[in-house]
Amino acid sequence: MFASPAIPDEKATALIQWLIYQAWEKAPNEELVAATAERIVEAGVPLDRCRVAMYTLHPEIGSLMFDWDRAENTAVTGHRHEIAYSRDESEEWKASPLRHMMATGTLRLRRRLTGPGAELDFTVFEEFRDEGFTDYYACMFGGAEALRLIREGERSCGALLRWLTRHPDGFSEHDIAFIDSIVPALTSAIQAHLDQEIAANLLDAYVGPLVGGRILKGEIRRGMAESLDAVLMIADLSDFTSVSDIVSKEEMVSALNRYFDAMLAPVHAAGGQVLKFLGDGFLAIFPFEPGMQREVAQKALEAATEALTAVDALAETEADLERPAMGLNVALHLGEVMFGNVGSRDRLDFTVIGPAVNEASRMESLCRSLGTDIILSESIATLLPEQTRLLTRMDLRGVKGERALYAPLPATTGAVR
């Protein structure tokens, strides 16, 4: 169990109350840490540098660090550092006293850096001493479950805090008690902000920023939907089924990730929003305001051709590595869709529905039979007549009436075969 700090004095109590209110504010955590450090100094604690490290939930970022340094002489200035996941720990981290604390379950670590009582048992302490610091204090904070997980090697919870001073006498016992007393409130305020950020990160990763933003704003009621004009893009990897029959499940997942990286980068760069992954493909939309149809259609076509080029380049690399290669089929259509919550009481999906979605899906399935990697609807071709050619007119399954289908001209994309 994490030990309870001593009863705070009047100045510490005031700071704790301020931190409690900050949990409801929206200021970035780097500003919160810096403002807290400033208030600690104002309370008489000779703090010169501090760091708060928190673990987060993010597909690529493992932890966040918030730093403040008094020597910068700029009021309320903090720095945020994002630490990516890494399979192999760096030598610097292996030699860190903070890693030692986690590995041993040590909740507090104090080291004098100068004078007869100096204890420089970690290399970084010598570096701090050379920078003029005289005293080092670090502490870990979290619940009992967090401590158990940390001791078992999990690094997904809890907080690590580091405090340094250049005062000739170092920290006093009162200074340490002051810091201990405000740590629970400080880490709770940071975590409150971080939880909102984590929710946004996870929603962005799993449903995209457009949908994630709406969900966080409270657009979560079933049936809540709106009409939206957009360019629809439906893409699908060709030869996926045959490839999946000859490689392991692990290899297939790894390959899908590589192909999605290649094909989605240009979609995101062009303002497209991926709403759904369809196994080996995806559904994306490019919303537009009135009068912006041509501009957005142009961006969507460029994204499609760039995605095709990227997939072709990746396929060549895969073949060179003796891995099965795949191609890409894309359909672009412009229309009105309903955008919102659809599903059962227990499971909702924020997506687009409507005849335009069905039509785009039917178009994409015809790429191979029509001999092209990209099929465009007449609504797209009408906006970009100088860049398209008519392929055919035909009935689409489940779509009423004959449809004219187009492809980009060879000058528009070298990927059309």
Image: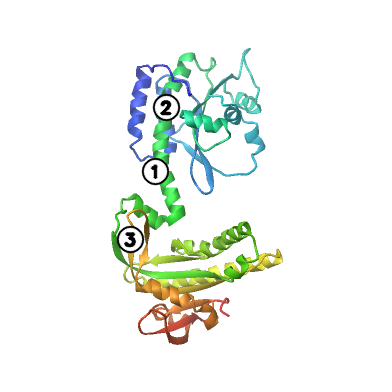
Q: CA distance from mark 3 to mark 2?
A: 40 Å
Q: Quadrant of the C terminus?
A: bottom right
Label 1 crowd (10 A; few <14 / some 14-19 / many >=20): few
Label 3 crowd (10 A; few <14 / some 14-19 / many >=20): many
The residue that appears at 61% across and 59% down in the rendered structure is 249
x%, y% of residue 394?
A: 43, 86
- Residue 398 horizontal side relative to residue 66, left or right: left
Please, what is the three-letter code of the amino acid marked with disc 2? Pro
The residue that appears at 40% across and 20% down in the rendered structure is 43
Please, what is the three-letter code of the amino acid marked with disc 1? Gln
* Circle nearer the N terminus (1, 2): 2
x%, y% of residue 125?
A: 62, 25
Labelled disc at residue 340: 3
- Of tags 3 and 2, the one toward the viewer is 3
Labelled disc at residue 184: 2
* Circle nearer the N terminus (1, 3): 1
Labelled disc at residue 196: 1
Please, what is the three-letter code of the amino acid marked with disc 3? Gly
Label 2 crowd (10 A; few <14 / some 14-19 / many >=20): some
Task: Give the camera-side residue of 270 and 185.
Answer: 185
